[in-house]
Amino acid sequence: MEHTIPGFRTVPRTGVIYVTHEATGHGFSYANPEWANLGQGSPETGNIPDAPPRITEVKISEASRQYGPVVGNKLLCQAVADFYNATYRRGKKSQYTADDVSIASGGRLALTRLASALGNINMGHFIPDYTAYEELLSVFKAFTPIPILLQAESGYKISPADLKEEILGRGLSALLVSNPCNPTGQLMEGAELSAWCDIARECQCSMIFDEFYSHYIYSNEIGSSRRESAHSKSRSGLTSAATNEKPKMVSAAEFVEDVEHDPIVIVDGLTKNWRYPGWRISWTLGPKAVIEAIASAGSFLDGGANHPFQNAALPLLDPKTAEAETLAIQKHFGKKRELLLSRLKKLNITADAPPAGAFYVWANLAKLPPPLDDGMNFFRECLKEKTIVVPGVFFDVNPGNRRTHARYKNYCRISFGPEIEKLELGLAAFERVIAKFK
């Protein structure tokens, strides 16, 4: 029996932390080349074809040795606002300013600030979704988390009409949404996303969009829309590509009518879309009143983000630099996506709905021979072959364990975030695992 210290509760590990901890007991380390970590929600961070050069050093000025503003470096806040205005809000009267942005140390902290600022409300969330939401939605007691189940038969999506019924029927004042979704990779865009924003305004339900994977989009042929002059360059001298292809990026910011009054809040950062997870720099974009509230929360939760790295992030927010990075991501990760889906299909591992975004396959194991049709068993057998996946039960977001029955026992999440060599290593391990039980 585990020893407890008086006054402290047992804090559960998130899915990724749990599987990494278990793998470490089997000899895993990040430095061990024999392991394929297809569980970690991290993109490869090195050079990829046609991407801007990676930042290799950060200069620390005298000023940045001091505390930074809790709300964030003013220059970075303005750079974030400018990026969204240039990318999603050209020609719109209402524009974001630095006052509509807050900087935090990573996405989970940004979401924690938001959760701590919510009132005594019903807060909607979806199932399946990001594992860390479970504890986030448990620890703050002012609001009540209300689950909304997404069915495989509907492609893990909900129609705007059904969404409106859920909001009104369950009395939701806020809704947490990952778009694209982690783990299913399902995406809202265009008219569908616009309809969600209309519902937020009409029903006065604040929608918090977790857009950390919003540059990993595979729903269209890259370069098929939105082209620019062959001579268009950023101040950094970069073009998106020799053919001036324009990548697709998705954000609810495109459909906000009034940045100060629409109840739309967006969370993103450098972790996934810029492939700098170690920097721990994120931002929250929304009405000034929300930004003031989460800045107050930040003053007691964390005290502000890393000051030197905020300064270093400024050139990354140049729209042309971001476009070049995004185009490279979509081509490179698109190839890995196709490789993973095709190889899994040969192994009788299916995707109920192939991912249109993010870098995960929500893998249905039901056709595998027992006991591998159970996600936890599959995970444990993969550990023996030095490969990590995340069992599906961790994505049954269940704050406070109020529901007694766990879903997704026949699923696991497989990441194609790592280098293609690691992906090949993991796929070979899957083949060995399955061969043992045939």
Image (spheres, grey):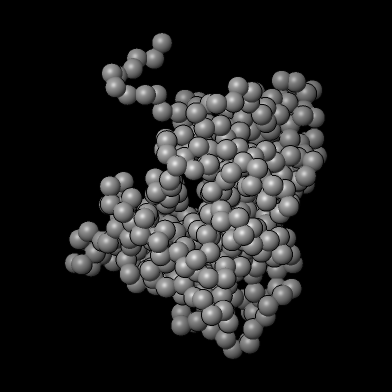
- The image shows a total of numbered marks equal to 0
Relative to 254, 136 lies left or right? left
- Whole-percent x, y for residue 121 in the image: 49, 43
Farthest top residue in view: 1
Q: Where is 171 relative to 382, above or below?
A: below
Q: Is residue 51 visible?
A: no
What's the residue at 67%, 38% (across, down)? 149
Q: Is residue 72 visible?
A: yes
| Of residues 385 and 258, the one drawn nearer to the viewer in this rendering | 258
Which quarter of the rendered picture does the C terminus lie within?
A: top right
- Whole-percent x, y for residue 143 in the image: 47, 40
- Whole-percent x, y for residue 172 in the image: 57, 45
Which quarter of the rendered picture does the N terminus lie within?
A: top left
| Of residues 195 and 50, the one drawn nearer to the viewer in this rendering | 195
Q: Where is 231 relative to 359, above or below?
A: below
What's the residue at 65%, 68% (across, down)? 248
Relative to 12, 334 lies left or right? right
- Whole-percent x, y for residue 267 in the image: 49, 56
